[in-house]
Image (cartoon, helix red, strand yellow):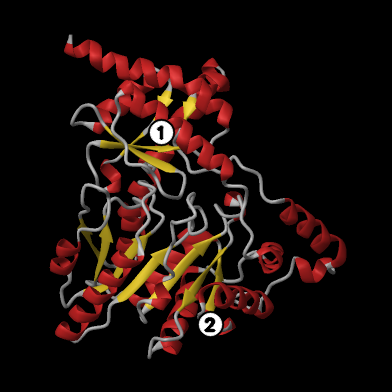
């Protein structure tokens, strides 16, 4: 008999992917320029010129046998050493190569990490709104997912977080800048989360890990907005990173896991990461792109375009009467539905060829996510559709 759970997952895509596939059909039917697809977080900004130059240099100067060959299972040592050095220089940490494990993107990083630390029956806490696949990753590792709510500004409800911690809690996942809200957890929030986990761990006699999902770390738009590096606030922290967004390389699937050297059991946790990678078959991330990020770690694509998109779309939506919390980072906007059922709102938006993701699967009903990492021209074309959508609700009231 087949694994029914996995068959079900294979038959039904995530709500994001379902909408993306719907959009492909609509584009084929009526023309791509007539569909306003805000479904996927697929960067439209090209990778920095240095990335292209580095790729060409690597290909031209590296023995093809070595370039396309295997690295160590956890990744090439020199690559891991370079990333550790970059993190140390930026965040004042003391990481080394054996704190790093190279992966095929953040999804692999999260999956490996959860399999490394979770035993069947453990609990993993996620804070709404959250990326829906967290539940798939955690439950696949045998954990029970516990959802903690947020306040009106999409910041963590710290009282609910404290009340959610039990002797079975193994990890808490944070994501800042946040997908889908664009909210950044400031130093105050991170300190309070760390205090709660430290206190609860002592009271329960347990070990609680703080997993930071950070594909959007560099994507912040205002100089005063800082993204705290969690290893400086909580010793049992693990960072899951991807270059998909910062370097506009989503299809290349390259990232890493960083295990804090401050945790007492660091070597055991790192061994667990290596073992989970082996068990899952996630060994030896693509060598070409390992070598690329070795040369380009610390660079970021031109995110000023996303900022312009954010400001243009935000101002327009507010002027049309929509309620929106201004995103501080990432490239998502969480918009309040004019009706209680966000799925009904998203279905109505489809009539105007607007593809918006309902927030239900993100743990926040009554909202939709807009991914504004699109070409500015599409933002401009879409505004008439957003205005018409807003007017359709005003007409309902008349």
Q: Which mark is residue 295?
A: none
What is the spatial separation of the Cα atoms under label 1 and label 2, in whole angstroms? Answer: 39 Å
Q: Tell me where residue 10 appears, x and y as whole percent.
A: 40, 47
In the rendered image, the residue lying farthest to the front is 224
Q: Tell me where residue 186 appears, x and y as whole percent.
A: 35, 62
Q: In the rendered image, which residue does mark 2 sit on? A: 95
Q: Which mark is residue 314?
A: 1
Answer with the quarter of the image where residue 398 lies: top left
At x 16%, y 78%, the residue is 167
Answer with the quarter of the image where residue 64 lies: bottom right
At x 19%, y 65%, the residue is 161
**Considering the numbered disc 1 on the image, is that residue within a helix, a strand or a loop?**
helix
Whether residue 151 can be seen here: yes
In the picture, measured across the screen, residue 151 lies left or right of residue 95, that is left
Question: Of residues 102 and 6, which is closer to you in this image?
Answer: 102
In the picture, measured across the screen, residue 121 lies left or right of residue 139, that is left
């Amino acid at each position: 008999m087949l694994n029914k759970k996995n068959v079900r997952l294979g038959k039904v895509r995530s709500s994001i992917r379902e909408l993306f596939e719907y959009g492909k059909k609509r584009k084929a039917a009526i023309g791509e320029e007539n569909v306003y697809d805000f479904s996927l977080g697929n960067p439209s900004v090209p990778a920095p010129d240095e990335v292209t130059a580095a790729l060409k240099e690597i290909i031209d100067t590296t023995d093809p046998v070595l370039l396309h060959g295997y690295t160590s299972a956890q990744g090439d040592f020199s690559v891991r050493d370079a990333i550790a050095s970059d993190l140390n220089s930026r965040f004042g940490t003391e990481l080394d190569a054996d704190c790093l494990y190279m992966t095929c993107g953040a999804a692999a990083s999260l999956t490996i990490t959860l399999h490394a630390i979770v035993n069947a029956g453990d609990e993993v806490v996620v804070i709404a709104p959250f990326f829906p696949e967290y539940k798939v990753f955690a439950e696949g590792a045998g954990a029970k997912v516990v959802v903690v709510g947020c306040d009106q500004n999409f910041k963590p409800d710290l009282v609910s977080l404290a009340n959610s911690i039990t002797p079975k809690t193994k990890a808490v996942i944070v994501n800042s800048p946040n997908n889908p809200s664009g909210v950044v957890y400031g130093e105050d929030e991170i300190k309070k989360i760390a205090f709660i986990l430290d206190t609860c761990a002592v009271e329960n006699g347990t070990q609680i890990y703080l997993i930071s999902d950070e594909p959007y770390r560099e994507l912040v738009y205002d100089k005063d907005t800082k993204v705290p590096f969690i290893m400086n606030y909580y010793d049992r922290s693990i960072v899951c990173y991807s270059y998909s967004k910062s370097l506009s390389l989503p299809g290349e699937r390259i990232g890493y896991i960083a295990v804090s050297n401050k945790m007492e059991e660091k070597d055991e946790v790192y061994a667990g990461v290596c073992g989970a990678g082996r068990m899952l078959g996630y060994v030896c991330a693509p060598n070409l792109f390992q070598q690329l990020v070795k040369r380009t770690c610390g660079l970021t694509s031109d995110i000023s375009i996303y900022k312009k998109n954010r400001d243009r779309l935000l101002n327009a939506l507010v002027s049309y009467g929509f309620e929106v919390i201004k995103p501080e980072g990432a490239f998502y906007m969480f918009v309040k539905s004019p009706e209680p059922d966000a799925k009904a709102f998203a279905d109505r938006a489809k009539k105007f060829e607007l593809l918006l993701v309902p927030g239900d699967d993100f743990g926040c009903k009554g909202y939709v996510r807009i991914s504004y990492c699109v070409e500015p021209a599409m933002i401009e074309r879409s505004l008439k559709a957003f205005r018409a959508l807003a007017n359709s609700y005003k007409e309902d009231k008349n």
